[in-house]
Image (spheres, rainbow, N blue to C red):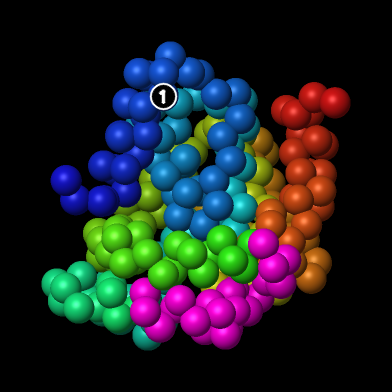
Amino acid sequence: QALTLPAVAQAVGELLAALKLRPSLIVGHSAGAAIAMRMVLEGLAAPQLTVSINGAILPLQGPVGRLFLPLARLLTVNPFVPPAFAAVASLPSVARRLLEGTGSRIDSDGERGYAHLMADATHVAGALRLMASWDLQPLADALPRWRAPLLLIAGESDRTLPASHSQRVAALIGDASSSCVVLPRLGHLAHEEDAAAVLAPMWQRRVIAD
């Protein structure tokens, strides 16, 4: 099936139901935050707290936003793109530059993990399919009716999604149960750079117990 946001949220919700799991805390990073919020809006999950780490929740702004989806769709129809990207990304220097472009500095084990994923043509093809099907406007339109507890965590140095993205989400929701925390010096992969700093706001919301 198409990897649209509603379809992915539904699939994860069905997985939780099959496993008979009812999470009290759901943490989503980047596109994962949009999936988590869609699940809550659709009644597929009812956590005590939803946490967005540098969440990709609103449509991209400006020329990048207008070009992003058409370009991703164009790339998905070309079967040579995923293996070509994977071949180039398998070079350590290329993977490192791509990671540095997120504004994050992670350890060598983390770099090797991302390089491994980027060198997998099947994984690249799946990521492109996801991006080609991604439409965040319906989620953005639903934000004013969001009333569940939400913690938005943003990295001050995120080059993929600026912290202002999460701040705009908080403003659109405008509910006291939602808050936004900006962490200094951290980039898009904030949770991999400094897990303790990312966990600290969750401790403060009293969802994670000592």
Residue 208 appearing in the image: yes
What residue is shown with label 1? 16
Question: Which residue lies at the image location 56% right of the left edge and 61% below the top edge?
Answer: 113
| Residue 208 coordinates in the image, percent (x, y) | 75, 29
Where disc 1 sits, the SS reads helix
Q: Does the magenta run of residues contain 108?
A: yes
Query: Where 126 falls versus 80 (above or below)?
Result: above
Q: Amino acid at mark 1?
A: Leu
Q: Position of residue 197 (x, y in %)?
A: 81, 52
Quadrant (top left, top right, bottom left, bottom right) of the C terminus: top right
Spot the residue most to the right.
Answer: 210
Helix, strand or loop: magenta stretch = helix
Magenta stretch contains residue 164 = no
Mark 1 is surrounded, within 10 Å at the Cα level, by few (under 14), some (14 to 19) or many (20 or more) other residues, namely some
User: Going 37% across and 64% down the picture, which residue do you hit?
Assistant: 120
Residue shown at the point (32%, 26%) measured from the top left? 14
Residue shown at the point (67%, 62%) measured from the top left: 109
Q: Foreground residue, 159 or 123?
A: 123
Give the left or right position of residue 61, taking residue 205 as reference: left
Q: Residue furthest top?
A: 20
Camera-side residue of 91 and 166: 91
| Residue 41 drawn at (x, y percent) | 41, 34
Q: Nearer the viewer, residue 15 or 141?
A: 15
x and y, in percent, of residue 91 in the image: 49, 81
**Compared to 131, does 170 lie above or below?**
above
Q: How many marks?
A: 1
User: As displayed, is residue 195 above or below residue 9?
Assistant: below
User: Quarter-wise, where is residue 87 in the image?
Assistant: bottom left
- In the image, the segment drawn in magenta is 86-109
Relative vertical location of residue 187 with respect to residue 175 in this rendering, above or below: below
